[in-house]
Amino acid sequence: MKPIEILSSLPQWANAAPGTILDSPAFALPCRLGDETSSLRHARVCPAESDMLVLAVTFGDEPHMLGLARSTRFQELDGLWETRADIPDPILLALAERECGAVFQMLENAVRKQLRLTGLAKTMDAQRLDLELADGSLAFSLTRSESVVSAFGVLRNLDLAHEAIRGQSLPAETEYASFVLPEADIASLAPGDAVLLPEIGALAPRVVADGRFVLDANGVSPHAEDEVVHVRAADGREISLGEVFDAAETPIEVPAAEPGIQLRLVKGGRSIAAGTLDHVARQFAFVVEARM
């Protein structure tokens, strides 16, 4: 599984509303400004309305406000910035149309609706998004409309390398072996019984994360409960989503099983016995201590 497939498998992200995704600190919308490839992120410093050139634009037929902060990317506008209030609106509008075409095209591509510049505006919408290019060379505010939120707030616009994503914690279990055991044998298990585990030492242990993913030498794959008996560590642990992402490329390292560790037998997602790892006839075995 690829990282985006892993993220999409988690209900809190798969079912997240566009606004929730957009408001994540990990928001990073890939974009192209002219010949440059970059990303749009939440602005670290929100430009004051008095420091913006506020333009009236439409996406399709929907009116929006676009407030541009001062930027050296707009050479003529930058040179006239301090005196822009004294410049006639038609001239200021013509300058914006000539110098900001790449920005308009970038936003048109991002919203997936045709953008049209309709004039200047005196104030910015109260509900707004403050965004900037990743390098900080361009900052702007845009009306936070339903169409903008739905276009921007999709999972592919999240930076999966961001700590807000990678740091998410998931419950995990270490699994040392699995085998088929007849129902009659399962029903007859009692304290003191031993189940031989030849897989331990021969096969690398794996991790089951969030009951959804299997992390092993083959990377990350979906987990599904089955009718096989699984031998897992008695104590669960936490694993970060970043570690799951990394396991898709680099096999996760799991400590080998040692005699004396506490284990559980699990079938169909339900624990059926608790016990200890021991040796029987020089072979690893699960020694039953209690039925569950």
Image: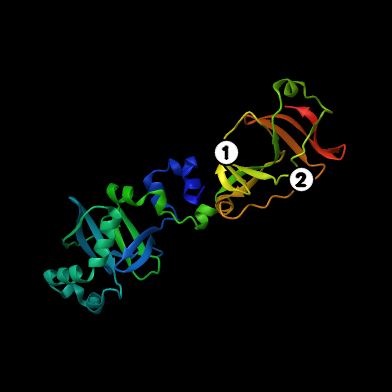
Residue 68: horizontal and vertical position, in percent? Answer: 27, 66
Q: Residues within 10 Å of mark 1 (few under 14, many from 20)?
A: some
Q: Is residue 283 left or right of residue 272?
A: right
Residue at 50% x, 50% y: name it.
2
Relative vertical location of residue 247 with respect to residue 53 in this rendering, above or below: above
Whether residue 231 is visible: no
Q: Which residue is tagged 1?
A: 223
Number of numbered labels in the structure image: 2
| Quadrant in which the C terminus appears | top right
Spot occupied by residue 152 in the image (x, y as percentages of width and height):
34, 52
Q: Is residue 247 left or right of residue 155?
A: right
Does residue 28 show up? yes
Circle 2 Cα neighbour tier, 10 Å, few/some/many (<14 / 14–19 / ≥20): some
In the image, residue 73 above or below residue 276:
below
Of the residues shown, which amino acid type is indicated by label 1?
His
Residue that mark 2 sits on: 201
Secondary-structure class at tag 2: loop
